[in-house]
Image (cartoon, rainbow, N blue to C red):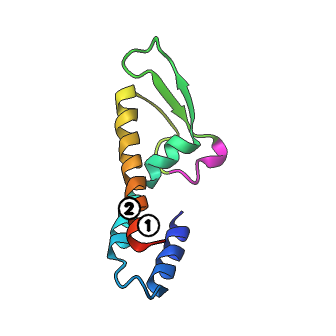
Amino acid sequence: MPETIERLKKLLAQCEHIPDISAFEEWAMRAEEIRPLRNYYVHATWDYLPLREESPLEFRIPPWRREQIEGRSQGAMRIEDLEEDAKRVEAVFGEFQSIRRQYGV
């Protein structure tokens, strides 16, 4: 994804109707910060273990994805933590949609 963002940044800089790409650059920094979290959710294998009340969600990163995903290869979490993290990822995506409308692309 960083390569895609860099390509998009270059294309925006070349657009005559977009004099200032600072909003995109600020968003790109936030997107880079949230990318590892997003990768966990998208690429991990998830299990729901309802009898484990404290942290019923368990995830594992498949061996073929471990080099692409930073951090732990497995773990457990509460549903509330998953919901909170999902809101953060959704917020960054929503910001991107706003920037697209702002720039008219």
Where does the image place residue 51, in percent across and percent down from the top left? 46, 11
> Of the residues shown, which amino acid type is indicated by label 2?
Ser
Front position in the image: 1 or 91 = 91
Amino acid on which the number 1 mark rests in the picture: Arg
In which image quadrant can residue 47 be found?
A: top right
- Counting labels gives 2
* Point 54% across, 76% down: residue: 7
What percent of the width, then of the height, locates residue 65?
62, 48
Give me the residue at 55% from left, 70% from top. Answer: 3
Residue 32 visible somewhere in the drawing: no
Q: Residue at x 51, y 80 (%)?
A: 11
Quarter of the figure that contains the N terminus = bottom right
For the residue pair 58 and 86, the one nearer the viewer reads as 86
* Mark 2 Cα-neighbour bin, 10 Å: few <14, some 14–19, many ≥20: few
x and y percentages locating residue 10 in the rendered image: 49, 81
Give the image quarter of residue 21.
Answer: bottom left
Q: Which mark is on residue 4?
A: none
| Residue for badge 1 | 100
| Image vertical order of residue 95 relative to residue 61, above or below | below
Disc 1 from disc 2: Cα separation: 5 Å
Front residue of 27 and 96? 96
- The span picked out in magenta is 63-69
**Residue that badge 2 annotates:** 98
| 97 magenta-colored | no
Q: Secondary structure at mark 1?
A: helix
Residue 74 location in percent, x, y?
51, 35
Left or right placement of residue 63 versus residue 18 in this view: right
Mark 1 residue crowding within 10 angstroms, few (<14) / some (14–19) / many (20+): few
